[in-house]
Image: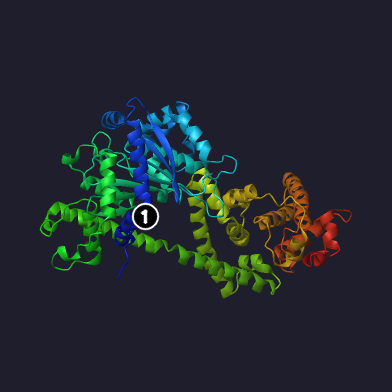
Amino acid sequence: MTKFPQFISGLDLANLVVNADLLQLSCGAVMDLHAETNRNPQFSVRHKIVSQSNCTIIAFAAPALSSEDLILQGGDLISSSVLKEQGFPLFESLCSEGNPSFSVHGGAITLFKAYFQELSLLKDQIHDSKSGELQVSSQLIVTGHSLGGSIASLFTLWLLDNIKQTYKKTKLPLCFTFGSPLLGDQGLQRAISERSKWCSCFLHVAANRDLLPRISSTSQSNPQCKPFGTFFFCSELRCNCVDDPEVVSRLLESTASPASAEEMGIDDYSGIVNSLKSRLILREDSQIGQPVLPPLRLGIILQLKAAGVEITAEQQQNSCIDDLISELESHENRMAQQMKGIGRIEKLNRVKINMAFLEWYKKDRKTKGAGYYDSYKNPCSIGDYNATKFKKSLTDYWRKLVEEAERKPQKEGAFMRETWLYAGTNYRRMVEPLDIAEFYRQKGKRDYQTHGRSKHYILLEQWQKEHAEKLAGPPNDKKKQNVAGNLTEDSCFWMNVEEALISCKQLKDESTIEKQSAREFLNKFEQYVMNQIINYAVSPEIFLEKSSFMKWWIDFQEIIETSHDSPLTGFMRNCRYRQYEKGLF
C-alpha cells in the first residue's frame, strides 16, 4: 500500500502529544500565570519560569483586552524592512537572498518591542551568548495563550536564531501556543521552513470552536498570514496533528465558524487537554459507512473529523465536503510524488557510486601514462565517454545542492555548507578538471575562469577557503606521505597549464605585444607551479610522460634561454619530481 506520511501519522502523533505530560504542564503553567496577572489588570506582558522534573517552562501572558483589540482591530502586518527602519532589526537575519523580507503580526511585534528590555534579561538568564548554548539542563518549553503565544513564538525564534549549531546534537527549545493568531506572512513561513530543524520546534494548539487562530487566514482584510510548524487541531473528543502548511491553511478555513467568534480562554484549552488525556483517540472506521473507502480517502476523512470538520456518511456526498476531501487527496498525491522524486538517500548513494567510478577512472588512466585529465580531453575509449555520464550526474547533484545552500539564510546556510564541505571539495577537485578539459578541447578557447567556470565551483572554492585557510601553511608529514593518492588542490590547475601552453605558442608565433603578455604570464605560472609543489598541493600525475604539463615543459624549454634559471626549471631539469611522488622533496 502506498504510504502517505501526512494522513497516516497525524492521528498517531496527536495521540503521542496528548499522552505526553508536556502539553498539560505547559497549559497549567499558562493558567497559573493568567491567574496571577488577572489580579493586576494594568499589566502589559508577563512571564514566569516554572521548573519541572523533566522540563523548564517559560510561560507568557498578554492582557485579554489587548488581545481582542490588537487582533480584531489592529492586526496589520509589519514588514521586516519597517522594523529595521524603526531601529529594531532583531529578526533581520531571517532574511536571505531568496527571501529578502517578511512581515509579522503588528499587535504581537508591538508588544514584543514594548517588553523587549525584560525579554533581553530573560534571554541572558537562559542563553549563554558566548557558547551559543542554552543554560537549562532539561528540555526548555516556551508557551503562551492568545497573544501570549505570539510573544512565545517570537521569543523562541529569537532563541533559535542565537543558538549555535554544532555537529553534536544541539538542544533546541520547543514552543507550545494555545489559541494564538497566525504570526506572519509567507515570507516568515519561508524563512522558518528554510531552517531544517526550526519547524519541528513549534506546536500550535487550535481548538475547533476557537476563531482566534483562524482570523488571520480567513479575514478578507488580512488574508496573507500563513502558518508554520505543526498544528494540533482538537476538540473535547478528538485531535489531529498536521504539519503541511497548505493543509493547515485549508483546515483553518474549513473549520472556521461564525458561531465560534468568541475567543476561547486558557481554561477552555485546559479542559480540552484534560478531556483528551482521559480518553483514547476515537477510531471511527465503523461509522464512515459503505462502500469501503480507499485508505488515503479514509485517512483524510478521519483527519478532517479530528480537526473539527463535521462529516457524516450523508455529508460525504455534499459537494463542498467532497471537493475539500478531493483537494486534500490531490495534494497528498503530489507530495508523495515529490518525496519519491527527491529520493535523497538514493541520490546520495548514486553520488558515492559516481565518485567511486571517477576515482577508478583516475587510477586506471594513470597506468596508461597520461592521467585522467588528458585522457578525458582526448577520449579514445568507452571508459572516457562513460566518465562524461558520471561527471554530468555529479555536477547536476552538486549544482542543485550549492544553489540550495546559497538561498539559505546566513547562519543556516553556513552550517549546511560545513556539513558537506569536505565532500564538496573532493567533488570540485575531481570533476572541475574534466570541465576544463571540455572547455579547452574546443579549438581557440581561452580564459576558462571568465568564460567557462560554473558559479557552483566558485562558491565551493570560496566556502572552502573561508572555512579553513590551509593552503598557505607548510605541508605536514602525512600530506607528504599521501601525496601520490591526493587530488590537486587547486581545481583550476589545468586551466593554468592550458593558458601556459597557449602562451608558449604566442611566444613562437604572435606579435610583440602578445609576446610580452605571454612572457609575463609564464613567469607567474612558474612561480605558481613551484608554490603548489612546495606545499605538496599537486598530484604527481602532472609529471606523467603524456600529460599536458609535461608537454608544456617540453615547449617551454624550447623557447627559454639556456641561462634561464628558476626554482621550477631546476626542479624539472634535475627530475626531482621523482622524489616528490615519494614525499621526499
Amino acid identity at mark 1: Ala
Task: Provide residue 585's location: percent of width, then percent of height.
Answer: 82, 62
Q: Is residue 551 above or below residue 55?
A: below
* Camera-side residue of 3 and 532: 3
Disc 1, SS: loop
For label 1, count other residues whose C-alpha is less than 10 Å away and answer few (under 14), some (14-19) or many (20+). Answer: few
Residue that protrudes farthest toward the left in the picture: 314
Task: Provide residue 573's location: percent of width, then percent of height.
Answer: 85, 62
* Camera-side residue of 114 and 529: 114
**Is there any visible trace of residue 242 in the rendered image?**
yes
* Quadrant housing the N terminus: bottom left
* Camera-side residue of 340 and 118: 118
Residue that protrudes farthest toward the right in the picture: 563
Q: Is residue 271 left or right of 29 when viewed as pictured?
A: left
Q: Is residue 544 above or below residue 113?
A: below
Task: Provide residue 523's location: percent of width, then percent of height.
Answer: 78, 49
* Camera-side residue of 304 and 24: 24
Q: Is residue 32 left or right of 311 when viewed as pictured?
A: right
Residue sitting at x 69%, y 69%: 370
Q: How is the image coloured?
A: rainbow
Quadrant of the image occupied by residue 65 = top left
Q: Is residue 345 left or right of 449 when viewed as pictured?
A: left
Total count of labels:
1
Task: Provide residue 233's location: percent of width, then percent of height.
Answer: 27, 50
Quadrant of the image occupied by residue 371 = bottom right
Residue sitting at x 60%, y 40%: 130
Q: Which residue is mark 1?
A: 20
